[in-house]
Image: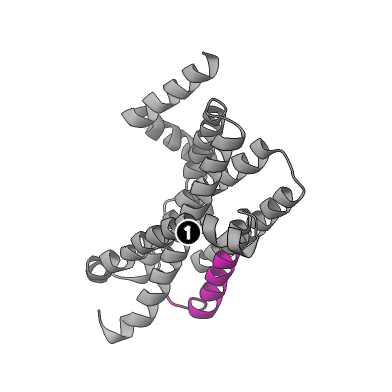
Amino acid sequence: MRKEETYLVVTLWLLLLSNALACQVSDVVAVSGFLSSVGVNQILVVWLVDMLLTILITGLQSLIVDRFNRVNLMGWMSCGYVLMLVVLRVLFSLQAPGWLNYSLLYLLAEQQLLFFPLLFWILANDLFDMAQTRRLFPLIATGSFVGQILGLGLVAIAPTLLSRLQLEPEELLSLNALVYLAAFLLIQTRLKGIKFRQIAQKQESAIAALTEAWSFVREVSSFRYLTIAIWQSMFV
């Protein structure tokens, strides 16, 4: 890695680490909480909703990404995650139904896992040329692995640590909100005004984008079989 590339690579590495850490924490808390407070059968409904959201976001992402500055979009997305996590923390404080809280948290975690990396790598691809991507992308990608490891480690020690501090497990949501707030500040201070390559994008209608996403689900066997299995399980 060259000296002039260090600043940008470290920034992107930290952003990827932040999202991976927060995703890991949210996912573990959501799944364990849902299974313990609601049950196994009901999670199939959540999976179905998640699949539909995935189709929708996959279909619309090209329309959204191509119409806005990608640095600004990443900042808005990070800020949006902060707000959603704060709302979830309030719902837990108000003792809203467990199925609602953990379902929303699970859906949020899945969208964090899907949409943030998607936009991140589109942005990164616009910041570097082909030769740089071959050298730097493997290094930047390690941020995700480090974030996952840190997230799992945090979840592992959280019960003991929270018990000693006399805090509820839901405080992990507050931590995640702080992580995304830090990511937002990082974007605002280190990526604002940065120059990136302009790439011509083919314009696509919303219907065409959704049709393409649905075709992807139909053509990929694993997605197709998962869809059939979820629908069958709901009516058994």
Q: Is residue 62 something that shows in the picture?
A: no
Q: Which residue is mark 1?
A: 157
Q: Residue at x 57, y 27 (%)?
A: 42
Mark 1 belongs to which amino acid? Ile
- Which residue is more in the foreground, 101 or 192? 101
Q: Main secondary structure of the magenta part?
A: helix
Q: Quadrant of residue 220?
A: top left
Left or right of 89, for residue 58: left
Helix, strand or loop for disc 1 = helix
Residue 195 sits inside the magenta stretch: yes
Could you tell me residue 103's position as x and y percent?
60, 39
12 and 197: which is toward the camera: 12
Occupied quadrant, residue 78: bottom right
Of 148 and 218, the residue lying toward us:
148
* Res. 120 visible in picture: yes
In the displayed image of the protein, which residue is found farthest to the front?
A: 164
Q: Position of residue 69 (x, y in %)?
A: 52, 65
The picture places residue 213, in percent across and down from the top left corner, at: 44, 37
Q: Quadrant of the N terminus?
A: bottom left
Residue shown at the point (32%, 63%) measured from the top left:
141
Residue found at x 44% / y 26%: 227
Left or right of 84? Residue 205 is: left
- Does residue 234 show up magenta in the picture? no
- The colour style of the image is one colour
The location of residue 55, given as percent across then percent down, is 49, 37
Residue 216 lies, with reference to residue 17, above or below; the image says: above
Residue sitting at the far bottom:
3
Q: Is residue 65 above or below residue 6?
A: above
Report the residue at 38% width, 81% height from top: 7
Q: Which residues are magenta?
A: 177-196
